[in-house]
Image (cartoon, helix red, strand yellow):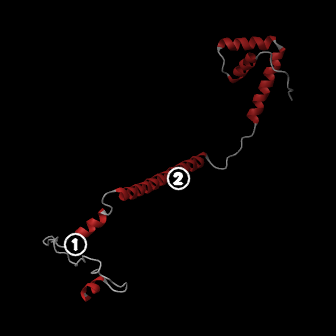
Amino acid sequence: MMTNHSYPPDKCTFELLSAYLDGEVTAEQRKQVQELLSNDPEIQGLYRRLLYLRQEINNLPTPSSECSAKQLSDAVFARVDQEKKQHKIWLWSGGTIAAVILASVSGLFSPNRTPLLQMAQENNSTPKNETLIIALNEPLIEIPTTQEEGLMIPLDQSLMDAIDSK
């Protein structure tokens, strides 16, 4: 088993050895590393430790997965689709609620507060050939001119019965 020694005197040398082991050096750098290995026993020890570390990493057992890559990707995409659907539902619900509130508030501040009720009454009222006549100078109910002539109606009697009995 290898023992840990001190770090190399130069960080660049360590990186150069690591790149040499990974096959990521140029021809000039490879020649430089081979010269270092043939002349410097400290570099040779570092090289052996890096080789040992590399072998041990490659020999580590890989954990087995609980499901295949396809099952995992299908589950991830299903979750993404579900979250997109929930986002759309919240968006549509919020928009609908906002529209209802806006319609309610605008109905409170409009000059005609009951346009739908007026349209319904106009459509269901009289046929088109009938006309409405308003008599402005002859009221339907006689209006008293003084308080003595005022109309006293008991609470249990209707307005029409009070007028007829007079």
Q: Could you say which disc has been placed on residue 125 in the image?
A: 1
Residue positioned 51% across, 53% down in the render = 86
**103 in relation to 52, above or below:** below
Query: Which quadrant, please, contains the N terminus?
Result: top right
Whether tag 1 and tag 2 are in contact, CB under 8 A, the answer is no
Q: What is the x, y in percent for residue 38?
A: 79, 12
Q: Amino acid at mark 1?
A: Ser
Lower sequence index among marks 1 and 2: 2
- Which quarter of the picture shows residue 125? bottom left
**Residue that badge 2 annotates:** 82
Q: What is the x, y in percent for residue 106?
A: 37, 55
Query: Which quadrant, please, contains the C terminus?
Result: bottom left
- Which quarter of the picture shows residue 133? bottom left
User: In terms of depth relative to the viewer, which is nearer, 133 or 85?
Assistant: 133
Q: What is the x, y in percent for residue 63?
A: 71, 43
Look at the numbered disc 1 and give the secondary structure of its residue: loop
User: In terms of depth relative to the viewer, which is nearer, 100 or 50?
Assistant: 100
**8 in relation to 155, above or below:** above
Look at the numbered disc 2 and give the secondary structure of its residue: helix
Q: What is the x, y in percent for residue 143?
A: 24, 76
Q: Amino acid at mark 2?
A: Gln
Q: Could you tell me how far apart the alpha carbons at marks 1 and 2 are, in whole angstroms?
A: 52 Å
